[in-house]
Amino acid sequence: MNSHQAPLRPVAWTIAAFIIAALPHLAAMPAWLAAGIVAACGWRLAAAWRHWSPPPAILRLALTGLAITLIVLAFGGLWGRRTATALLCVMLAAKMMEMFTLRDLRLVASVSFFLIATQFLFSERLLYLGYLAVGSLVATIALVRIQNVEAGETDSAAPGAEVQAIGSAATLLLMSVPVALTLFFLFPRLAQPLWGLPDQVMDGRSGLSDDMSPGSISNLFLDDSPAFRVEFDGPPPPVDQRYWRGPVLWDFDGTTWTRPFFSDTPSRQFVPEGDASLTYTVQLEPHERRWLFTLDYPVRGPEQALITVDHQLLSRHPVTALTRYELVSNPEFIDMPDLPEGARAAALRLPEGRNPRSLALAEELRARHPDHRDLIAAVLSWFRTEEYFYTLSASPLGRHGADEFLFDLRAGYCEYYASAFAILMRAAGIPTRVVTGYQGGLWQAGSDYLLVRQSDAHAWTEVWLEGSGWTRVDPTAAVSPDRIEQGARSVIDGPRHRLDLDWLQTLRNRYDRLQHMWNRWVLGFDHDRQRQFLQKLGLPDLSTERIAALMLLVLTLVTGLVSLFLLRRARPRSTGAVDRAWHAMLRRLQRRGLRKRLEETPLEFAARVEAALPAHGGAFRRLAATYCRIHYGDQAEHEADFIDQAKGFTPRRA
Amino acid sequence: MSSRPDPAHTVGADLRADLERALASVNAVIVDKAEVVELAFSALLAGGHLLIEDLPGVGKTTLAQALSLVLGGSWQRVQFTNDMLPADILGVSIFRRQDEQFEFRPGPVFANVILADEINRASPRTQSALLEAMAEGQVTVDGQTHSLPQPFFVIATQNPLDLAGTYPLPDSQLDRFLLRTSIGYPSALEERRLLVEPDRRRMLQTLQPELDEHRVIGLIELAAGLHVAEPVLDYIQTLVQATRSHAGLRAGLSPRAALALIRTARAHALVRRQDFCLPENVKQIFPHLAPHRLQPLPESGLDSRAVVAEIIEHTPVP
C-alpha cells in the first residue's frame, strides 16, 4: 500500500461524517446538486477501495468552478444561509476529489462538525440535538481513525479496530460535555440579539400571514408543528374562550382582508386589570413576524412590546428565535364603549360593485331586524339551520366571492365564514372587523401546558355593539361547533386519519412535552434566565464582562480537571505502589532539573543522575537497580523496601 | 554494569563462572572492546553467527582467534579468495582405491568455530555454500548429508572499503548472520597500551580454553531460560513495529527477527551477568541486529543504521 494514501476505513468514516452532516442540507437543495454531492462521495469511496489516483488538478479546478457557478445560478447569488451552507457542502464534496492525505481527511472531518451545527440556523428542534450527537460521534470516530493511522496503525481493518475507535470517540465526546455545559450556562447572553437572522427563517413553512384571503389559513391545517405553548398560572380558560388574538383586519378589497394603516402605530395604553384576569406565559416559536398572540385583552405585555388600538400585541422585531413572554389578560374588558367616527367608517367600508346578492340580503335582513343583536342571531341561526358545511376542500372563489359562497357553494372553511359574515354585517350597517389568530389548543395534562399548533389557525369576527363594545362573534362556531370544541383536526378528513392512531398521537404528545422542556430550559436560557441562574448561585448583578471572566475561570478549571483525568490515564501503567513510588521519585528529580527521557532506561538515567548529582547518584542508582529487579525481573521480595527507600529519597542540588 | 544480581543465585553458577573467565581472557587480549566482545559472546550464546565489518588491522582476526581459542572445541580458519570453490569449504568425496568406495573428506566447515576471513573475496557460489551450511547446520555433498558439529559458530569478516574484485554479501543473505558489528579504532590510551605490551600473536598463544562444547551448549540453554518481563516484551514489540511503519524502509522486521532479538537480548543479559533481561540489553543488541535486515528505499537516501538509531531515540522505554 502506498504509505501516502489514506487507507479505506478512515476515508469511509470521514465520508460518513460528511454525509450525516450534509444530509439535512441536501434535503433542502436542488436535487441535481444533492445528487452531485453524493456522487462525489461515492467516487471517493470507490477510489479508496480500488486505490485510484486523484484526478488531475485542472479537472478538479474545473469541477469546483462549475459547482460554484451552478450554485450562484440556482440560489441567485452567494448570500444567505441556504446558499452558504450549500456552498460549504459543495466545497467539501469537491474536497473529496483531492482528499488523499491524512491531513485532508482531518480537514473534512473537522469541518463536518461545523456543517452539522449549521443546521441550528434553520431549526432548533430537539430532534436535531440527537442528530447532532450522532453526527459528532461519527466525525470524532473519523478523527480517531485518522489519528490511529498516523500513530502507526498498520492494519486499519483489524476486527477490534472499529469498536476501539467508537469507544475512544465516545469517551472524547463525554469529556467535552463539562466544557459544553460551562459554555451553555456561562457564555454571556445579551439582552438584545447581537445579530438578526436574515429572513426566510421559516424556510418555506408558513405561520399565520398578516392578511386573509381564502386559503391563507387553511393551508396551515395540515401543519402540525407547534405555533406556541402556554402555561397558565391558574386554571386554563374554558375551551370556547381560547381565542388567541393575532392580526386584526379592517380593510377589504373584495378578495383579501388586510391590516389598516393605523394597525402599525402603537398608540394606546394597555387595558386595566379586572377581577377575572388571567396570568399566563407564552412560549412562541419563531414565525418571522411581529405578533405576540394573546387572549383578549392583554393587560400587561413583555417589555419592548407594543399594543395597537385593536389590541394586537406586537414585538419590536420579528420573532426569529423562540420567545417567552408573560402576559395578563382581562377577558371582561369592554373595548370601545363609544365608537369613534374614524373607527366606525373603517369598520363599515366595503368595496364597490362586489357581492351584489350579499348586499341585497343584508338590506333585507336590516329591514327585518332593526336591532343589531337580533340581526346577528338571525344570520348565525341561518348558517346553522341552512345547508352550510365546514369543509377544507372548498373551491377557489371568483370576483363575487361572498355571493358564490353564501348562495352557491355553501361549503367552506373559517376564512370563508368570517369574510362572508363580516361583509354581511358591514352591509347591514354593523361595524365589523376580522380577527385572525389561533383557536383552541391541546391541553397536555401531564405537563400542564397548552400546545397550540399551526393547524389551530383560525379566523373570526368582532362586531361593535352598543353597550358591549367590540364583541367576538365566530360564525364558524355556528356551522361547525366541533371545530371550536375539538379543534381543527376533528373536521379534517381523508389521509389525516392514519396520523390519528392513538399511540402515534400519544407519542407525538410525549415528544412535544420534551420539546417544550427543551424550549423552556435550553433554548429559553436567555439573558434574564442567566441572571436568575447566577443569582441563585449567589452572584447577583454581574456585568457581562464579569460573566465572561467567570466563564473563562470555570472553563480553565473544567479543562484542567479533564486534562488531569487524561494525564492520569496516559501515565505508563503505574498501577502498583512500586511504580507510583518510582514515578514520584522521578518527579522529585525533575524538579532538580533532571528529567528522565522517554527513550532512556532506568539505569541509563541513573548513570546520568550520578554524573549530575554525585551526592545522591549512588543512592539513586541502587534504587533504580532495585526498581529494575522488580519491574523487569521476576522477583517481588524487594517491593516494600524499595517503596520505603524511594519515599525517603529527596535529592538536593549539589 | 550496575545490575549485579544477588550472590544468592545458583542457576548455573559454575557455568556463569566459566563464562566470566572466558570473557576476562578475551578482554585481556582485545583491548578496550568490551562491548564488541559482549556482542560476540551474545551471538554465540544465542546460537547465531557474527559478521564483523571493519578495516584491516583493527583486530577482527585477533578477536575471532581469541574467541575460538577460549571456547575450546575445534576451530578452523578459512581465508577466502576469489578462486575458492565450494568443495574447499565443505569437503570432497575421494575415491579410495583400496576400499573401492568413496570417502568423504570433511572441509574446514566441520568445526565448532569457523573464522571466515574476508568472506566477500569469494565468489557468490562459494559464499552460498557456507551460508547454506550456516542456515541448515548440515552439509550435503554428492547426495550425502553430513551434520555439522554442535555448537557451530561462524565469525565472518568483511572489509567494507577495499571492494575491488570482491562480491559483497547480497542483502538477502546478510540475515544469515545474527549480528553485524564493527570494531573501530582503540582509544589513544588503549592504543598506547597496545604499543607497549607484548605482541598480540604471542598473547594469543597463551590463551587457555575456558569452555568446551558441552558448556557452551549449557550456557545457550541457560540464556534461553532467562526471564523477560512484560515491559521488555512491549519494548521489543514497539521497536519492531516501528520498523514496519517507517516510511523510508522497504519492509519492516519479520517476526523471525523479533524472535532473534529476544533470544540475543537474553544471551546479552547472561553475558552481562544478569538474572533477567533489561531494556538495556535490547537497546544494545538492536543496532547490531536490525540494520542488516532492513533495506531503505533507494530514493529515500537513508542509511539503515541511522534509521535504527532514530527508532531507538523515539521509542519510550516502558
Image (spheres, coloured by chain):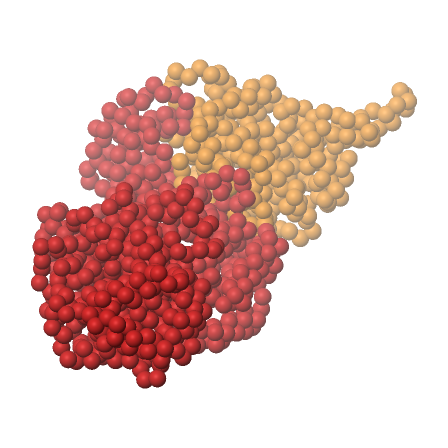
Chain colours: A red, B orange
The C terminus of chain A lies in quadrant: top left
Q: Quadrant of residue A340?
A: bottom left
Residue A140 in sight: no
The vertical placement of A93 against A250, above or below, is above
Percent from the top left, x then y, of residue B144?
A: 80, 27
Q: Quadrant of residue A426?
A: bottom left
Name which residue lies at 19% across and 37% down: A652
- Residue A474 seen in render: yes
Vertical placement of A66 versus A480: above or below?
below
Residue drawn at the location 44% of the way across and 59% of the way down: A24
* Picture layout, residue A6 above or below residue A163: below
A517 or A458: which is nearer to us?
A458
Q: Residue at x 9, y 55 (%)?
A: A275
User: Foreground: A155 or A389?
Assistant: A389
| Residue B217 located left or right of residue B34 | right
Question: In the image, B77: left or right of A85?
Answer: right
Question: Where residue A156 sits in the image (x, y, percent)?
Answer: 53, 45
Spot occupied by residue A620 in the image (x, y as percentages of width and height):
28, 32
Q: Residue furthest bottom?
A: A352
Foreground pick, A146 / A89: A89
| Residue A327 in the figure: left or right of residue A119 | left
Nearer to us in this view, A222 or B120: A222
Name the residue rendered at 20%, 33% in the picture: A650
Does A556 sit left or right of B152 as displayed? Answer: left
For the image shown, how many numbered marks are present on the structure? Answer: 0
Q: Quadrant of residue A481?
A: bottom left
In the image, residue A629 lies at what x, y percent? 37, 25
